[in-house]
Image (spheres, grey):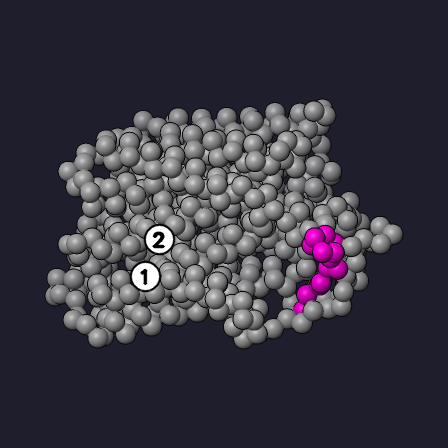
């Protein structure tokens, strides 16, 4: 192994050991009860709440997927998606966070999302809890696989090892860390990783801009590519039959500017709707120690998102000037951040920046695995099968579930040509459409009943698959990101079924009014 690669590896190993150390530091407290393991006993401060929520949300696609899209076909797709995410982040923190923090405590002190929905409607049969837990298992397993793809691409690109072994190594590391420390370790390390991520982005964009001759030169180069720097058009790389971009005399070839339809713009903006159903973000709302501190958290989270998304898109543009032919497929384009870092920075600093990608991946995968495991152990195993199960038993089952879910995610991630952005977009749509409308109606519409909640979850979740697999391939006006039609269909199901069936019991409505008036448990 070259000396530079060895230094990068040592730096990253030191970082990984630090993260595991955080897990051990919180291990004793995490194992006191399932409340502490899954929600940290509702003790998070505003900075940890905000930064861990955004770090767990953004994942490796912030440093690989988003710059890769910008590098491959220009700023339009990446920018409209970033704008949608920025708006969604702010609005979710503004209208959802305080009401959910208050309501989750009032509704039986719920510590998982399925438990909150079940308690919100005072159901006895736990149908809502079961359906919610199953959808979480499905979509978070897919989501976790995107993180493992990131690990595989990162380590194989850096060190020249095979993709699959490196992906499995990353999975083992994340699994070990999550099993040890639970939610508190996850949140504390996610805070640190949010700092590492934004520092890594900033360092690379500064050094890269200097190497490219300044921002003006980067923009001038991008303008030479038809559609590359437009918000209402996009570049079209000329590729061969294998999807590899054609290069002539050292110059990557592009076709004419491609049009940019209204459906594509709407699809990008629709990403913001996903936040209302993201369990890893919603759990942070539930876990903060005081509702009053959520205002500070909202400001911190919004600033972090705006800065990180803007830099991530610009890195893709910058990479096209500095390394125009280094990445010749859409999948390889997602390595632009790695290529920039390893070629422009000293090995030790490059190792720290690579730790930023690892940080983004860990901060998401640990959240996904933990939430999926809690859905099974707390909501399915204890909620349905073994209601008499002790807290200790639930913790052991959750760790077993972590292992099984991780193995399934590994199988999904075996294809090294997987595009991270594509995997994430499907799972994001799944959560946004399954839980987003139900969360909003549960918090703000008293007439929502149990039947409407079930119809909304099932309708939204199923429509994601139907639209993605059957409708969207028709093209034209049907080519809209599945999150939007599935989200709207879920809303329609909730309203129609709730109005067509019996209104909620007085006890449920009184609890809603108490929460609306600002009363917690």
Location of the N terminus by quadrant is top right
The picture quadrant where one finds residue 494 is: bottom left
* Residue farthest along the front direction in this orientation: 241
Magenta stretch: dominant secondary structure? loop
Residue 194 locus on image (x, y percent): 51, 42
Give the residues drawn in magenta, as a range: 233-245
**SS label for mark 1:** helix
- Residue 371 screen position, x and y as percent: 36, 44
Q: Is residue 236 part of the magenta span, yes or no?
A: yes
Q: Nearer the viewer, residue 391 or 194?
A: 391
Asked if residue 307 shows in the view, the reply is: no
Q: Is residue 11 above or below residue 149?
A: above
Q: Position of residue 40 (x, y in %)?
A: 32, 39
Q: What is the quadrant of residue 477 in the picture?
A: bottom right
Q: Residues within 10 Å of mark 1 (few under 14, many from 20)?
A: many
Q: Residue at x 56, y 36 (%)?
A: 164
Vertical arrangement, residue 425 with respect to residue 374, above or below: below
Q: In the figure, 435 relative to 283: above or below?
A: below
Give the label on residue 135, or none.
Answer: 2
In this image, 514 relative to 75: left or right?
left
Residue in the picture at 56% in, 26% down = 13
Q: Secondary structure at mark 2?
A: helix
Say if mark 1 contacts mark 2, CB within 8 Å: yes
Q: Which mark is residue 11?
A: none
Q: Nearer the viewer, residue 393 or 503?
A: 393
Can residue 249 be seen at all in this image of the molecule? yes
In the image, is residue 72 part of the stretch drawn in magenta? no
The span from disc 1 to disc 2 (Cα, nearest Å) is 9 Å
| Residue lying at 48% horizontally and 69% vertically, measured from the top left | 471
Residue carrying label 1: 457
Q: Position of residue 175 (x, y in %)?
A: 43, 33
What residue is drawn where x is 18% and y is 36%? 389
């Amino acid at each position: 192994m070259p000396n530079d690669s060895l230094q990068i590896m040592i730096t990253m190993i030191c970082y990984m050991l630090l993260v595991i150390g955080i897990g051990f530091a919180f291990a004793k407290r995490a194992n006191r009860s399932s409340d502490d393991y899954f929600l940290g006993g509702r003790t998070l401060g505003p900075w940890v709440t905000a930064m861990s929520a955004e770090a767990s949300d953004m994942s490796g696609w912030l440093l690989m997927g988003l710059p890769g899209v910008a590098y491959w076909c220009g700023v339009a797709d990446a920018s409209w998606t970033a704008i949608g995410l920025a708006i969604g982040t702010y609005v979710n923190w503004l209208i959802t966070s305080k009401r959910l923090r208050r309501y989750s405590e009032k509704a039986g002190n719920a510590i998982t999302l399925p438990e909150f929905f079940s308690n919100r409607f005072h159901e006895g049969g736990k149908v809502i809890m079961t359906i919610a837990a199953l959808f979480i298992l499905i979509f978070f397993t897919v989501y976790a696989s995107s993180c493992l793809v990131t690990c595989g691409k990162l380590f194989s690109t850096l060190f020249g090892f095979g993709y699959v072994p490196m992906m499995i190594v990353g999975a083992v590391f994340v699994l070990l860390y999550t099993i040890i420390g639970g939610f508190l370790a996850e949140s504390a390390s996610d805070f640190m990783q949010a700092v590492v991520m934004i520092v890594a982005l900033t360092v690379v964009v500064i050094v890269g801009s200097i190497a490219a001759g300044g921002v003006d030169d980067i923009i001038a180069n991008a303008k030479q590519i038809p559609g590359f720097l437009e918000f209402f058009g996009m570049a079209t790389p000329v590729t061969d039959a294998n999807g590899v971009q054609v290069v002539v005399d050292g110059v990557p070839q592009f076709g004419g500017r491609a049009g940019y339809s209204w459906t594509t713009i709407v699809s990008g903006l629709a990403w913001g709707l996903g936040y209302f159903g993201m369990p890893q973000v919603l759990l942070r709302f539930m876990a903060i120690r005081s509702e009053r501190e959520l205002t500070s958290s909202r400001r911190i989270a919004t600033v972090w998102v705006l800065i990180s998304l803007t830099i991530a898109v610009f890195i893709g543009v910058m990479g096209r000037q500095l390394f125009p032919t280094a990445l010749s497929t859409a999948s390889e384009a997602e390595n632009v951040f790695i290529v920039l870092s390893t070629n422009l920075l000293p090995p030790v600093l490059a190792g720290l920046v690579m730790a930023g990608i690892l940080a983004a991946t860990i901060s998401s995968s640990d959240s996904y695995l933990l939430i999926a495991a809690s859905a099974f152990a707390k909501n399915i195993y204890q909620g349905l099968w073994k209601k008499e199960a002790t807290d200790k038993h639930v913790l052991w089952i959750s760790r077993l579930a972590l292992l099984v879910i991780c193995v399934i995610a590994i199988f999904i991630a075996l294809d090294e040509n997987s595009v991270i952005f594509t995997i994430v977009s499907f799972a994001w749509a799944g959560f946004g459409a399954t839980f987003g409308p139900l969360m909003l109606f549960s918090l703000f519409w008293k007439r929502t009943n149990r039947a409407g909640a079930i119809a909304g979850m099932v309708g939204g979740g199923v429509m994601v698959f139907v639209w993605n697999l059957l409708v969207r391939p028709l093209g034209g006006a049907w080519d809209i990101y599945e999150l939007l039609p599935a989200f709207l269909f879920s809303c329609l199901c909730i309203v129609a079924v709730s109005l067509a069936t019996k209104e909620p019991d007085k006890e449920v409505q009184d609890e809603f009014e108490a929460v609306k008036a600002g009363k917690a448990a």
